[in-house]
């Protein structure tokens, strides 16, 4: 669900509260996605979950594990690649060159990327064309299935890479 939010220091944010600053200091703020009730509830519930002890540690551990699981079989097959992003949002770019910006990312081998993504989906992992977003609901079984899908995908990319 789309949601917009504005955040800032109290001395700035208070200008959105007419009761706090009066008519002269008040700044009206409206946005298409501001205050969407369904998205607001979803956002609040997400924050509630993230505030639980260990949530961020678990989220980052899942991401780090999956980043390694994505990279290791590609490395084993000698496929040039870079894992880009952070443990909570990452992807593979098929290039041996450093990926420092969008242009570098766009130089990656798109055929290898399409092959990898299709092979992952064949194994039941719904990875979009770009980026993977690990989450807290992943079970050990989910992680193992994803790791197996990455191995399968690396094999598929290697078959195309070696045939070229």
Image (spheres, rainbow, N blue to C red):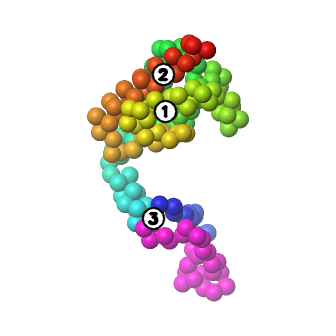
Classify 10 Å Cα crowding around label 1: few (below 14), some (14-19), many (20 and above): some
| Label 1 sits on residue | 118
Q: Along the polypeptide, which appears first: circle 2 or circle 1? A: 1
* Mark 3 → mark 1, Cα distance in angstroms: 31 Å
| Label 2 sits on residue | 156
* Mark 2 → mark 1, Cα distance in angstroms: 9 Å
Q: Nearer the viewer, residue 110 or 163?
A: 163
* Mark 2 → mark 3, Cα distance in angstroms: 39 Å
Judged left or right of residue 143, residue 37 is: right
Return the residue found at the far right.
103
| Label 3 sits on residue | 39
Please tell me whether residue 42 is drawn above or below residue 65 in the rendered image: below
**Residue in the image at 38% along x and 32% along y:** 123
Please tell me whether residue 79 is drawn above or below residue 32 in the rendered image: above
Closer to the eye: label 3 or 1: 1
User: Would you say residue 18 is visible in this rendering?
Assistant: yes
Closer to the eye: label 2 or 3: 2
Specify the quadrant that holds the C terminus.
top right
């Amino acid at each position: 669900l789309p949601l917009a939010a504005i955040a800032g220091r109290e001395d700035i944010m208070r200008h959105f509260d007419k009761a706090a600053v009066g008519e002269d200091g008040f700044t009206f703020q409206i946005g298409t996605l501001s205050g969407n009730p369904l998205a607001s509830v979803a956002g609040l519930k997400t924050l509630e979950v993230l505030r639980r002890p260990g949530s961020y540690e678990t989220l980052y551990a899942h991401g780090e594990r999956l980043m390694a699981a994505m990279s290791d079989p590609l490395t084993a097959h000698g496929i040039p690649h870079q894992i880009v992003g952070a443990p909570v949002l990452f992807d593979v770019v098929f290039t041996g060159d450093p990926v420092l910006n969008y242009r570098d990312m766009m130089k990656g081998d798109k055929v290898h990327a399409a092959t990898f993504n299709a092979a992952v989906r064949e194994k039941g992992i719904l990875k979009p064309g770009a980026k993977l977003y690990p989450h807290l609901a992943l079970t050990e079984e989910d992680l193992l299935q994803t790791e197996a899908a990455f191995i399968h995908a690396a094999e598929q990319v290697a078959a195309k890479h070696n045939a070229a």
